[in-house]
Amino acid sequence: MNITKILLKIAEASLSAIITIIIVTYFFSIPLGFILMFLNNETASLIATKVKVLIIFFAIDFWSPLKINLGVLFSVLLLIYLLCLILSWRNELPFHKAILNLKLVFKNWLASMPLISSALLLTIIFLQNLQEKHGVPTGAIQFQNPYEALFSLAYSPIIEEIGFRISFIGLISMLYCLNSAKNFAFKPLILKISVLSFLYPDKAKQTIGLENIKENGWIKGIKLGEWLTVFLTSIGFGLAHYLAGSGWEVGKITSAFLAGLIFSLVYLRYGFHASILLHWFFNYYGYIYELAVEKNFLISIVLILINNLTVILGVLTIGFFVMEFINKSLQFIASSKIKESNF
């Protein structure tokens, strides 16, 4: 084995180790949230508060007439995120197989999530800084206390993913799949396909033999109606943040649009749990360690380590996608020249 292969093996092992460390922090953030919310004298009155449950379908707010204990609701939210993490571990290709072979990393959502989330985070930070320099403010949400912020940031990813991604894009995927199934011998699978279309759109297509992202790539695997829905819901997602009047300024429209776009693509490829977790990364996960350090539940070195590893992964992932784009572009140009020379 020459020196180049040895260095490559070391680099792959290091990257796998960084991804694994970040994933450990994902799982640890769940009990950490429980500790901060329930084993804390500051939150006694908050967790005993009765709140109405907000659900969003097709970007429309629906309020439950019944009130539920905030502490109970927060516990349910943490459980949902834990279940999403467990689903991500086992879904498609098991995590331990994907992490041991980085060529397979994008076949498992949990293994690829640190890469995609960190790259998206750095891109959004760059975009917002660029806008700020040109006088376009992003703004920020103001909360009365940090624990209300923690609850809100745990709550919003689930209801917003249902309201903007799963309901709209899931419906379009279901209609497309059912229309295709009607033309084939898949009538006994109609119920299964309908449910799969909302939970795992790509699996629904695979079930009835339609072109899908996993087997045919992003361009062929996503149909025109789905692309249109992705862009429209992403625009709506960006506008909703600004128009909500919660503190976001006009600059939030573009960054929320970009985030919504990636959330949508992740949902179409990996399923509902993936878009929920990616949204969770920017809300709950992005806040929980800061709050833990601020309240002296963790030492600051933990937050510094997470931030530095996230930046490293983000830079490497962006670099990888840039190189892939350049490589694909050069291949396309070369193939075009060969076709021209044959005429």
Image: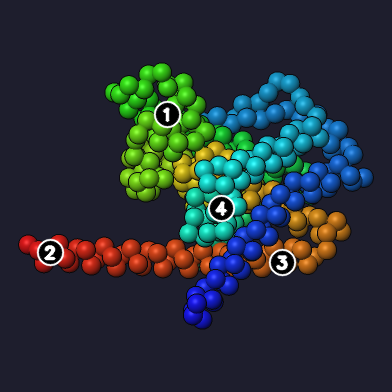
Helix, strand or loop for disc 3: helix
Residue 158 position in % (x across, y down): 62, 38
Residue located 74% across and 46% down the image: 30
* Image disc number at residue 305: 3
Residue type beneath disc 2: Glu
Which comes before the other along the chain, label 2 or label 1?
1
Residue at far bottom of view: 3
- In this rendered view, identify the residue nearer to me: 177 or 125: 177
Residue at far left of view: 343
Residue 178 position in % (x across, y down): 37, 25
Which comes before the other along the chain, label 3 or label 1?
1
Residue located 64% across and 64% down the image: 17
Q: CA distance from mark 4 to mark 3?
A: 26 Å
Q: CA distance from mark 1 to mark 4?
A: 31 Å
What residue is pinned by disc 1? 174
Residue 340 position in % (x across, y down): 12, 64
What residue is pinned by disc 4? 97
Mark nearer the viewer, 1 or 4: 4
Displayed quadrant of residue 306: bottom right
Mark nearer the viewer, 2 or 4: 4
- In this rendered view, identify the residue nearer to me: 181 or 117: 181
Residue type beneath disc 4: Lys
Task: Estimate how packed mark 3 is, as few (under 14), some (14 to 19) or many (20 or more) residues with alpha carbons within 10 Å.
Answer: few
Residue at far top of view: 188
CB atoms of marks 3 and 2 within 8 Å: no
